[in-house]
Image (cartoon, rainbow, N blue to C red):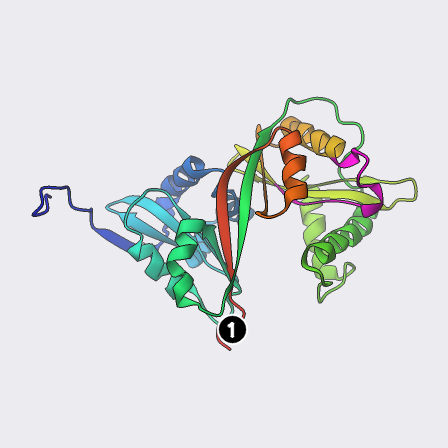
Amino acid sequence: MMSAQGTMAAPPMSVRPIERRDIPALRALLSQTLPISTHIATGLEAMEWNPDQIARRCVGVFTDTDIHALVLTGQVVRAVLFTTVDDHDLDSCLRAAVTPDTRALMGPENIIASVREAFPLSSERHFVVWEGSAEARRVERIRLPAPHELASFAEASFRAFHEEVGAPPAASPDEQTYLNLWEEARQRGRLIGMWDDNGRCVFRVEIRPALGLIAELRGLWLDPALRGAGIGQALLDETAAYVANAVAPRIQVIMDFDNAVASRLYRRAGFVPVGRLARLELPMVGG
């Protein structure tokens, strides 16, 4: 259809829940938007691509029968945009997805900027997506935790969280809910770390693979007492080799835009910046 000016009119768009028949197209969409959409793809894979769960939590923006954008709803509303279509429907979809339980909106910077005005009391953070690769080789120091080492991994995880946000979590590392989640991740081979001679976890990272193509590293942390001597660089190299051996050929990390120390670390390890994300914290929603 041609407009009065002689240009091609935009195809009709619709917004609706993802259905079982959409899942192949959804996987293709996420594959084409990696690594920006890795944080969504890993969430769906954690659901084991259960169509009923996906239908309850995912909304698509469609042009004819093609999915052009995805919104994954929950406490953090996540969005990924596939094409440069008019994002009016996506904007409306994001606004509608926010409920009193929603803590944040996260997605590509251009998408978040388009809805920022709707939440004037929100605070905004920006992130850089880094991508790297590594050759599969023998790894010496990092490994999967043994069952009895999970508590030490949990303690290191809470130290990492405290360091990142400046305050301890409300729960504690020995809370059974957390231990159950980490035990499940351990059994799936998604936790690796390094332990000292006293059994204390001094390095930890979580691995979230997406579509068999890329692995996202989450919560990379080294004990402060070991920093500044090149150990972190070496362990990042070993982590990349571990991922290449056991998980996926490509690796990504997402970090704060202004984290200059981490930027230098990833650049030295051969990572390159491949995208930008933004996150709106919504503390007053429903208040």
User: Is 168 positioned to the left or the right of 23 in the image?
Assistant: right
Q: Tag 1: residue type? A: Met
Which residue appears at 20% of the width and 47% of the height?
11
Residue 113 in the image: state x and y as whole percent: 41, 56
Q: Nearer the viewer, residue 217 or 51?
A: 217
Which residue appears at 44% of the width and 50% of the height?
109
Region in magenta: 217-232
Residue 46 in the image: state x and y as whole percent: 56, 47
Q: Nearer the viewer, residue 250 or 45?
A: 250
**Residue 248 appearing in the image:** no
| Residue 183 lies within the magenta run | no
Most extreme residue toward the right is: 198
User: Is 3 positioned to the left or the right of 205 in the image?
Assistant: left
Most extreme residue toward the bottom is: 287
Mark 1: few, some, or many residues within 10 Å (few <14, many ≥20)? few
Residue 260 in the image: state x and y as whole percent: 64, 43
Residue 81 in the image: state x and y as whole percent: 38, 46
Q: Nearer the viewer, residue 194 or 4?
A: 4
Reply above or below: 93 against 138: below
Q: Nearer the viewer, residue 275 or 27?
A: 275
Which residue appears at 31% of the width and 43% of the height?
84
User: Is 161 positioned to the left or the right of 58 in the image?
Assistant: right
Residue behind mark 1: 284
For mark 1, give the secondary structure: loop
Q: Quadrant of residue 88?
A: bottom left
Q: Quadrant of residue 58?
A: bottom left
Which residue appears at 73% of the width and 58% of the height?
162
Reply above or below: 252 against 180: above
| Residue 221 lies within the magenta run | yes
User: Is 67 positioned to the left or the right of 13 in the image?
Assistant: right
Reply above or below: 136 against 35: above
